[in-house]
Image: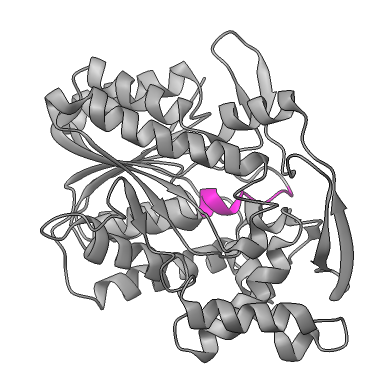
Amino acid sequence: MIVEPKVRGFICTTAHKEGCRENVKQQIEYVKSKPKMNSGKRVLVIGASAGYGLASRITAAFSGGAKTLGVIFDKPASGKKTASAGWYNTAAFEEFARAEGLYAKTVNGDAFSETVKEQVIELIREDLGTVDTVIYSLAAPRRTMPDGEVVSSVLKTTGEPYTNKTIDLASRTVVPVTIEPATPEEIVGTVKVMGGEDWKDWIYALSDSGVLAENAVTVAYSYIGPELTHPMYYNGSIGAAKKHLYETAKDMTEEMSDIGLSAYVSMNKALVTQASSAIPVVPLYTAILYRVMKEMNLHEGCIEQIYRLFSEKLYGETPVTDGECLLRVDDWELREDVQKAVSEAWEKITTENLDSLSDVDGYWEDFYRMFGFGIESVDYAKDIETEVGIPSIIIEE
């Protein structure tokens, strides 16, 4: 069938198999064009099918030569429904990995569940013995707790209502927005979903089962951003979860010092993701940031960010941190000259000057690219088969 993008709100309900494959291929080619690095050799990526998680798997495999095991939560094609972009991405990654003799297997299911943890542990035990690196890259709207309770995350401010401007991406207009504060219960739920609790559960489950190597490294991904976005992010409900993530890293490093575990949180730059597209204020900030950083030749996508994280911050002679457990690859975004230019544009921006003060086109390009659309080398008028298998897939029952 001929597959076209169908956008609803901040998600695309279709994905293009060939476009996703080409997107993965281009990321692999970028990594292979860079110097090889001495990274982890047996790498588990939790949340491996898109964004920073996919970029981590690609970088570990094609630069560091790592054996990679990915955990995803994606859907195959069914009838007239395409597979999710993450499914296509994973199929393409495994295809390219196998072609170069690289170990790559995938577990598809809810990473929060005990069943998936058990399946992953068994696979590590059978195939790898241990893992020496664990990347935690989950962004989820809800979590089913071990007792069956379902808790949800919210994207709200805290304290008082917050009013600022944002972008209506569909109409390309700058509009005012007021965000109501999260309730105490919503903040607790957001921390349970997006904080460090499940990350810690994973690390302890791996360690207790004897499949976490001594002197292992684990990294979770996060974002702080500038003061402009703090009411919606760093000081909002999601920020409470991210602060919990930070405390979890410190706790795990201290509690597991007997096996030499090093736990870090990587503070990455603002990019277009399904999660960030849903946060009021942030998409407008990101569109302005894109223009500024591209003009300064500082812009990075996911793959560039993760290659720099691995090669310059994590796997040098010693990890480059803020003095504790934060790896800062948001350093270019938060440069004084970058933020000065962003702030000046923010004060002036309106619907009328949106195109000159921001990079909305670049924002949309990245959005469509997440789903395999808008890639020049792909013929979107071509009739394609939408189904594709993942040879190694283990699906949670």
Question: Residue 114 vs residue 240: left or right?
Answer: left
Residue 238 in the image: above or below residue 125: below
Is 81 covered by the magenta stretch?
Answer: yes
Give the quadrant of residue 106. Answer: top left
The residue depicted at 76 percent of the width and 79 percent of the height is 347
Residue 186, image x and y in percent?
Answer: 72, 29
Pick out the residue farthest to the top.
147
Q: Which of 393 and 159 is in front in this view?
A: 159
Vertical position of residue 101 compared to residue 228: above or below: above
Q: What colour scheme has been applied to the protein in the rendered image?
A: one colour
Image x and y of residue 74, in percent: 56, 41
Vertical arrangement, residue 190 with respect to residue 295, above or below: above
In the rendered image, is residue 388 in sight?
A: yes
Q: In this view, does 45 lie to the left or right of 381?
A: left
* Left or right, 273 with reference to 47: right
**Residue 247 x %, y %:** 41, 34
Magenta region: which residues? 80-88
Which residue is nearer to you in this view: 384 or 338? 338
Residue 290 drawn at (x, y percent): 59, 78
Instruction: Name the residue at 29% across, 46% down.
Output: 324
**Residue 1 makes an appearance in the image:** no
- Residue at 56% of width from left, 36% of height from top? 241
Q: Nearer the viewer, residue 102 or 273?
A: 273
User: Which quarter of the picture shows residue 150?
Assistant: top right
311 in the magenta segment: no
Q: What residue sits 43% from the left and 74% below the top?
A: 332
Q: In which quarter of the image is the N terminus?
A: bottom right
In the figure, 391 relative to 298: above or below?
Answer: above
